[in-house]
């Protein structure tokens, strides 16, 4: 792979890599996943909401105005049945699409975590090297009390433990209120 000559080229490559990952994910969907995604896209759109609203209003108006021809008089029991039937199928199909998206997001989160951990390790090494270079060249550094802490290796398992402890104590204090 050729080296990037500009930030613009570097960011373009990153965007292309992400798009490639998205295409690969979309290409490996099953028929059911594609159908669920398409269904969720249609049901979650303004044209669908507007069309459904028009149909419901038409249903109600025709059944209220046309007393003698009303197929579903007030309180619109048939309409309730139709909407319940629609919801009974729409909800699980939309959940299937959301579950697939959640799995994809989880993969992205794991990748992001791995990259962040690598960047943290690289930064720690760079800080140590920079300090050694400055010491070798006799360059005085402004003493930042946090500098020594930044040069230490970050242990993700310690961070997880800290997060869990803080969440636990926060949860306990909320219960005590």
Image: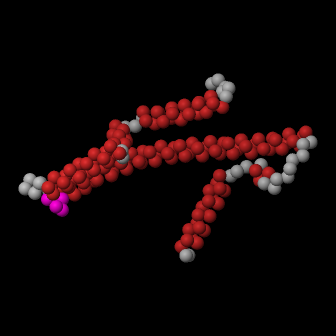
Between 175 and 74, the residue placed more toward the observer is 74
Judge left or right: residue 155 versus residue 168: right
Between 113 and 15, the residue placed more toward the observer is 15
Residue 6 in percent (x, y) is at 67, 28
- Residue 32 appearing in the image: no
- Residue 94 appearing in the image: yes
Q: How was the colour assigned to the protein in this rendering?
A: secondary structure
Residue 23's place in the image compared with 108, above or below, is above
* Residue found at the far front of this picture: 65
Residue at the spot 48% in from the left edge and 36% down from the top edge: 22
* Residue found at the far bottom of this picture: 177
Residue at the spot 39% in from the left edge and 45% down from the top edge: 97
Between 50 and 166, the residue placed more toward the observer is 50
Which segment did they paint magenta? 73-77
Judge left or right: residue 119 versus residue 145: left
Residue 106 in percent (x, y) is at 51, 47
- Which quadrant does the N terminus fall into? top right
Residue at the spot 86% in from the left edge and 39% down from the top edge: 133
- Which quadrant does the C terminus fall into? bottom right
Residue 5 in percent (x, y) is at 68, 26
């Amino acid at each position: 792979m050729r080296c990037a000559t500009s930030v613009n080229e570097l960011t373009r490559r990153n965007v292309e890599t992400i798009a490639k990952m998205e295409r690969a994910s979309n290409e490996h969907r099953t028929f059911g996943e594609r159908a669920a995604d398409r269904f969720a896209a249609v049901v979650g759109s303004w044209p669908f909401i507007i069309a459904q609203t028009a149909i419901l209003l038409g249903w109600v108006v025709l059944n209220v105005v046309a007393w003698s021809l009303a197929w579903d008089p007030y309180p619109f029991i048939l309409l309730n049945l139709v909407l319940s039937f629609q919801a009974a199928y729409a909800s699980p199909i939309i959940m299937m699409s959301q579950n697939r998206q959640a799995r994809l997001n989880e993969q992205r989160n794991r990748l992001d975590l791995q990259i962040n951990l690598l960047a943290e390790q690289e930064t720690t090494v760079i800080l140590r090297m920079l300090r050694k270079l400055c010491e070798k060249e006799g360059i005085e550094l402004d003493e930042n009390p946090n500098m020594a802490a930044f040069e230490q290796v970050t242990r993700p398992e310690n961070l997880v433990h800290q997060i869990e402890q803080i969440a636990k104590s926060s949860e306990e204090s909320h219960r005590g209120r």
